[in-house]
Amino acid sequence: MQHPDEIVGEDADDTQLLRTMATEAREYIAAFDWCPPIRRLSLGFGVGGVIALFHVEFTRAIDDVDSELWVVIGDLPSAYFVYEGNEDPAVALECYCGLMEEWALAARDGESVEECFPVDAEATRENAEALLSRIAFIRRELVPDASAEQGLEKEQ
């Protein structure tokens, strides 16, 4: 995983988009009252302007429990979730998809989303279908890419 200053995308535009997304991820997580100071924010996987997965390390644990989180930013709902320490970016993206799918299915079916991860969108059928479409794309196109990239990093 790379530090934001070291992020290099497929070209200059992708690099700039990913670096901007790193700033957005830092601002997103730092906006929570419970957020401790951030020690390091590293890119786990990203497609500039579409989705970026960041590993965030804090200077101290949140409520004496979690000192690291994953943060997802992009053209979809932002989210954070616990970094377990052994999962790779593909597993983390799948976890994100699960969180968003739970909200989308409840919203689509007219059920309460109160127990779901909070999504900054109205819980309508239209929003749910749009999110389900993005989730399907992530699972079909990006999770395999993240898995392949992780395999390359392990070989080096």
Image (spheres, helix red, strand yellow):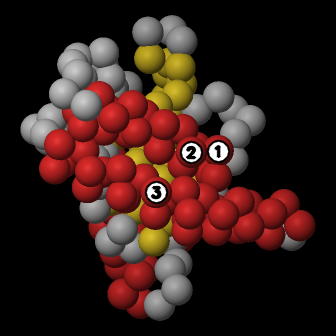
Q: Is residue 112 above or below residue 44?
A: above
Q: Does 151 sit left or right of 137 as displayed?
A: right
Q: Are marks 2 and 1 in contact (CB under 8 Å)?
A: yes
Q: What element carries label 2?
A: helix
The residue wearing badge 1 is 91
Give the residue at x 18% y 48%.
Answer: 127
Mark 1 neighbour density, 10 Å: few (under 14) some (14–19) many (20 or more): some
Mark 2 neighbour density, 10 Å: few (under 14) some (14–19) many (20 or more): some
Q: Is residue 44 above or below residue 79?
A: below
The quadrant holding residue 67 is top right
> Looking at this rendering, what residue extends furthest in the right direction?
155
Question: Which percent across, then down, holds residue 131?
Answer: 30, 51
Give the residue at x 42% y 53%.
Answer: 135
Mark 3 neighbour density, 10 Å: few (under 14) some (14–19) many (20 or more): few
Instruction: Tell me the CA gap for discs 2 and 3.
Output: 11 Å
Callout in the foreground (1, 3):
3
Q: In this view, does 46 lie above or below 100?
A: below
Question: Which percent across, then down, holds residue 152?
Answer: 80, 69
Give the residue at x 26% y 55%.
Answer: 130
Give the total number of marks visible in the rendering. Answer: 3
Instruction: Say which amino acid is labelled 3.
Output: Ala
Q: Does 116 sit left or right of 149 as displayed?
A: left
N-terminal of the pair, mark 2 or mark 3, is 2
Q: Are marks 2 and 3 in contact (CB under 8 Å)?
A: no
The residue wearing badge 2 is 94
The residue wearing badge 3 is 136
